[in-house]
Amino acid sequence: MSDTLKRRSFLKGTLAATTALALPMRAQAQDVLKMGVVLPSPIADVGWSHTLMEGVNTVKEAYGDKLEVTVLENIMEGPDADRIANGLVSEGNEVLLLGSFGYQNGGIQIAKRNRDVSIIHASGFMVEPNFAPFTAKYWQGTYLMGMAAASLTKTKKIGCVGAFAIPELITSINAFMLGALSVDPEITMSVVWVNSWFDPASEQEAAKALISQDVDVLFSNAQDTPSVIAVAEEAGVYAYNLNSSMKSYAPSKYLGVVGTDWGPHFKRLVDGHVAGEFPGANYWLGMEDDVVFTADWNPDIPADMIAQIEAKQAEIATGDFVVFKGPLTDQAGAERVADGVAMTDDEIISMDWHVAGVTTPLPS
Amino acid sequence: MSGLEFLLAGTLAASLPLLLAALGEMVVEKTGLLNLGLEGMMAIGAAIAFICVFHTGSHVLGFAAAALISTVIAMLFAILVIGVKANEVAAGLAIGVLGLGLSALFGKSYESRTISGLPKIDIPILSDVPLIGPTLLTQDIVVWLAVLGTMALWWVLNRTKLGLIIAAVGENADAARSIGYPVVLIRMCAVAFGGAMCGLAGAYASTVYTPLWADGMIAGRGWIALALVVFGTWQTGRVAFGALLFGILSLGELTAQAMGVGLPSQVLSSLPYLVTILMLVVISRRRSCPTLPP
C-alpha cells in the first residue's frame, strides 16, 4: 500500500515538475485539492443538505484557496448518481462527499476502483480503507427533547411524524419517549408514519391528524422542509426537528433543535486524506464527538428543567448517562433490556420495537 | 377536535388539487387527446404561484400567474401534438418532465420558504350548524369557487351545445369537421383549459393547502389525477367523487394511525391506490360504462 502511494506521489511529482517547467500556472493548480459533493436534495436555508454543506464550508474555511469544491445538489439516488460521482472522479476530485444512503453501492464501486480517491458517505454501513460512512446519534438529543416536552405538555400526549419506520428513526422516537417518561411517567406518544421521505402535504396532514388527537408537542422526524414545524406554530403546539434549526418558521412555538455539526469530522477526514492516511471506518458520532448538539430552546421551558437538561446533556457527553439502558420494556409490556444492562451499538442500530409509552403500533 | 371533525374539515382541501387537475384533464380527454404532463404542469404552476405570492402577497395574482404559465406549457403540448402530429404519449411525458425541471429551476432560491395561506371563511348561519358547521362548511374561498366551478363544468358539458361539440370532437373528429366544427381550435382550447386547471391545482397545493415551496412537493398527485379521470369514467360527478374519496382516504389513513388503529401503516398508505385499482376493475366489469375515452 505504502509502496503504491510512494510510486504514485513520485509520478505526480514528476508530472508536476515537468508541467511546472512548461506551464507555471498549471503547476499551482496541482496543489489545490479538489473535493466533489453529491447531495440528495436542493440546498436550502434548512434541512439535511444544508447541514452537510455547513460541514463542507468548515473544511473550506480551513483550507482556503487550497480546496476547490464542486457541489451537485438534488441528485436522485440510483444510476444517475453513480454516473455523476464517476464524473467527479474523472474530473480530478480526490475527495468525495456522498450525502445519501442510496449512493452507497455506486460509491463503494468507485472506492474499489480508485484507491487514491477518498469517499465520505452519509448513513451507510459498508466500509473500505478509502470509504468512510457516518451517522449521528440523534437519540442523545431527542432524549433531552423528551424531557423538555414533558415539562410543557398539558394533555400529556406527545406525537411524532415519521418518514419511514427504520431503526434510525425508531431510536430517535424511543429516546424521545424515554426522556419524557423520565420526567412524567403518565405521558404517552402517538406516531404517524408518512411512508415517504418527501411529501410536505402529507406531512402537514399527519401533523394535523396528531393535533386533532390532542397531541401538543410534535417531533418532526426526518422532514427536510418546515412542513410540520409550520403547522405546529399555526395550531399553537410545540414542535422540534433534527439537523438544522427551523426556529424562524415557528418563532413562538419552536421547542428547539437536535442539531448536527459535521465540520470537525469532515475536516479530520480531509486532513487524513491529505496526509495520505485516510481513516476509513464507520463513524457513529454523538455529543461526545461534538457532532450532536441542542440549541434554540423555547423560553417557555421552566428554568429548572433547562438546568436538568443541561446536566443530563453533560452526563451524556461524558458517557456517565446512557439513554438505552435497562430496564426497558416494549409496548406489549415485555422486558427487552434487563435492569442495568446497556444496549450494544449493534442492538441500537437494529432496534425494531417501540418502548412502552408509545401507543401507536409499529408497522412490521 | 376529534378524528371525524379532522376528516370533515380537511377532506375538501386535500381533494382540491386532485379535483382541479383531473377535471382539466377530463376535458382534454373528452376531445380525444391524452396529456400525460399533469405532474409537470402542476409543479410549474405551484412554483410560479408560490413565487408570486411570496413577493406580492396576492393569492389572486399567484393563481392567475400559475394558470397562465401552465397554459403556456400546455400549448407547447398542443403545438407538438395537434400542430406537428407528434406522438401524444411522448409529447405529454416530455412536457411533464419540462414542467418539473422548470419548477425546480424557478423555485431554486425559494426552497423551503413558507408563506401564509388563505383564511377559512365563516359563513353566517351555515357555520353554526353543529358538527359540520365549523368543519365541513368552514373552508377557504378557493374551495367554494371550486365547488361552484365543478357544477358549472358539469352544466357546460351536459346541458349546453358547447358540451355536445366537445363530445362530438372526441367521439368522431372527422364527422365533427365535416359538419363545420373547428376541431383543431376546440382541441387547442381544451388543452389550454387542462393546462390552466393544472396550474390552479398546483397553485392551491403550494400557496393554500401546503403554503411552502419545496422541489418535488406535488409528489405524484398529477399521476393520481390522471388515474382519477379513468376512475370517474369521464363524468364530472364521478371524477369529483373520486377526488373526494381519495382525499378522505389519504386523511383517514393518517387519522387512523394517529388514533393507534392496529393496521400496518404501509397498508393504510396504499389504501387510496388499492381502492383506485379496485374501482378500475369494477368499472371495466360493468359493460355499460366506457373504459376508453368517449
Image (spheres, rainbow, N blue to C red):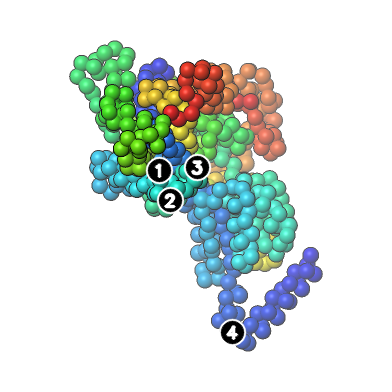
Look at mark 4 in the image and give the residue it sits on: A23
**Callout 4 amino acid:** Leu
Q: Circle 3 is placed at which residue position? A: B89
Q: Are marks 2 and 4 in contact (CB under 8 Å)?
A: no
CB-based contact (under 8 Å), mark 3 and mark 4:
no
Give the letter of the chain under mark 1. B
Disc 2 secondary structure class: loop
**Residue B41 circle label:** 1
- Real-space Cα distance between discs 3 and 4? 54 Å
Instruction: Determine crowd level at label 4: few under 14, some 14-19, many 20+ residues with C-alpha closer than 10 A.
Output: few
- Mark 1 and mark 3, same subunit? yes
The answer, for residue A26, to whether it is visible in the render is yes
Mark 2, residue position: B84
Q: Say which residue appears at 39% left-offset and 36% top-offset.
A: B173
**Which residue is found at the position 37% from the left and 25% from the top?**
B236
Reply above or below: A107 against A183. below
Quadrant hosting residue A334: top right
Chain of the residue displaying label 2 = B
Which image quadrant is residue A359 in?
top right
| Residue, far front | B178
Characterize the local packing of mark 2: few (<14), some (14-19) or many (20 or more) Cα atoms within 10 angstroms: few
Q: Position of residue B259 (x, y in %)?
A: 49, 19
Task: Report the quarter where the C terminus of chain A lies.
Answer: top right
Tell me the distance, in whole angstroms, between the alpha carbons under discs 3 and 2: 14 Å
- Amino acid at pointer 3: Val
Question: In the rendered view, would you say A76 is above or below B33?
Answer: below
Q: Nearer the viewer, mark 1 or mark 3?
A: 3
Nearer the observer: mark 3 or 2; the answer is 2
Q: Residues within 10 Å of mark 1 (few under 14, many from 20)?
A: many
Percent of width and height locating residue B125: 20, 16
Please determine whether, in this image, residue B271 is positioned above or below residue A269: above
